[in-house]
Image: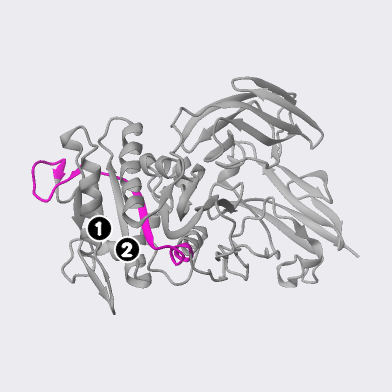
Amino acid sequence: MKHTKIFLILGVILCLAIGNISAEVKRPSREYKVYFENTSNELCVYKLYGRFDGKTIFILGGIQGDEPGGYLSADLYPDLVLDRGNLIIIPRANFRSIILNNRGVNGDMNRRFDRDTPQDVEDHIVEIVKELMSECDLFLNLHDGSGFYSDTYIDENRNPRRYGQSIIADASQLIFGNDTLKLEEMARKVIERINERVEIPEHAFHFMNTNTLAKDTKFPEQRKSATYYAVTNLHIPAFGIESSKSLKSVDLKIRYHNYAINEFFKLIGVEPEQPAVLFEPPKLIYMLVSIHNAETKLVENKGSIQVNVGDVLQITHIESNYNRGITCDVIGAGSEQDFQKPILIQKPTSIIVRRDNQVIGNVHVEAIGKPIDNITYLIEVNGSQKRIVSDQTLSVRRSDKIKIIDVSIPGETSSELKVNLKGYVPRNAVNDGEDRNSLIDIRRLNWNKYSIDGNGKKYPIVVTRGDRELTRAYIFIQD
């Protein structure tokens, strides 16, 4: 593996040690790094080092969120032990889209690799993927494609415009100086071995050449893809592996992906020391729920927890038979990923636990007391929780640190709101105007032009939905 770079992320300087791979790495071993932790964009990166060094394969799953065969196949590989070679694995590149079972909540992430300047969190994920590509010798992008690819038109589901059951390359062969990427030759060797194991003839794999570099290509959009970036910028072999969305079971999609990955292992000499674990249905066992950072309760799947209206809950632990791809969602509050986030409870609700987009368990939250009728701001000051209402002012000192936990508006869904403390610019993050759960040092609140009186004393907390302002409250800085 090659030495990685330090690059700009989230719009400001943040050193991301994507990898510092050297001959001195412990072998065999495993490294794990998470970006955007406990958010719906969480990105988990696994690096596996074999007992003996060798070629490195990068497996990318879940760049499109409605293709479970790909990301569940990739998810089996971080638990391997390698005898020879190395692996880089991102099982879920587009976690938010996976949670929502959507191809791309913000458009197709696999059409962002032509961009030079990141504009949002998905662009930053793409930049991380690009950096990891520079460390590998072979890149595999896992997908579930429509229908069944065929060189000739057979019917609506089997023709040259379908993708399922294929290995896709951007060219048959590419020459860069003294190096030749024999993409078709590599793919056909793998396909021959896969098809020896495919029991249903209609499920046989085929080679698909998109001829992306050709002026008259039928697939010009592929010039924005991950594989095109890998072959044209890094000059490494790169392939899309497509199981068919028409297959009846996810297990079968996973198995075909595994066949292809394992044959690429053999092709370039990556040797597992042990096989992948068996796929079993995911389930919630229990969760730990903290109330006001004081009392913690253990609640089993399908159990219930009783709290008072106005209590703040925090899910601090989720016990499942899987560690990866797990999220929790307090319905009607927070976002798609509420793990370890303070959530203000105003009415009865449920905590839904998912693995990817599959609900694997739930806990009922019984809220006792009269519902809050007015707009409430929950703000933490030096660790102590304060409540103010719309148009009210909270006084703080320059030395204080605050955190806007949430704003509750009857009839509004918290995840659809944006809460912005005017004059605050977060460090090491994209300034998207959403300031909930950011630890704010009042000493850094010094943009006088955003203050109400212009002298840097009183700053508004503005809550919007779309372009409409719904409410505001204020922070007043005492001398």
Question: Horizontally, is 213 left or right of 123 in the view?
Answer: left
Is residue 210 in view from this perspective? yes
Labels 2 and 1 touching (C-beta < 8 A): yes
Residue pictured at 59% horizontal, 56% vertical = 26
Q: Position of residue 11 (x, y in %)?
A: 57, 68
The amino acid type of the residue labelled 2 equals Pro
In the displayed orientation, state which residue is furthest to the top: 303
Residue hosting label 1: 186
Dot 2 falls on a residue whose secondary structure is loop
Q: Nearer the viewer, residue 147 or 264?
A: 264
| Residue 416, quarter of the rendered image | top right
State the extent of the magenta-drawn residues as a range.
Answer: 130-158
The amino acid type of the residue labelled 1 equals Met
Residue hosting label 2: 237
Question: Horizontally, is 180 left or right of 384 in the view?
Answer: left
Residue 349 vs 292, above or below: the answer is above
| Residue 400, quarter of the rendered image | bottom right
Q: Nearer the viewer, residue 416 or 11?
A: 11
Q: Nearer the viewer, residue 479 or 354?
A: 354
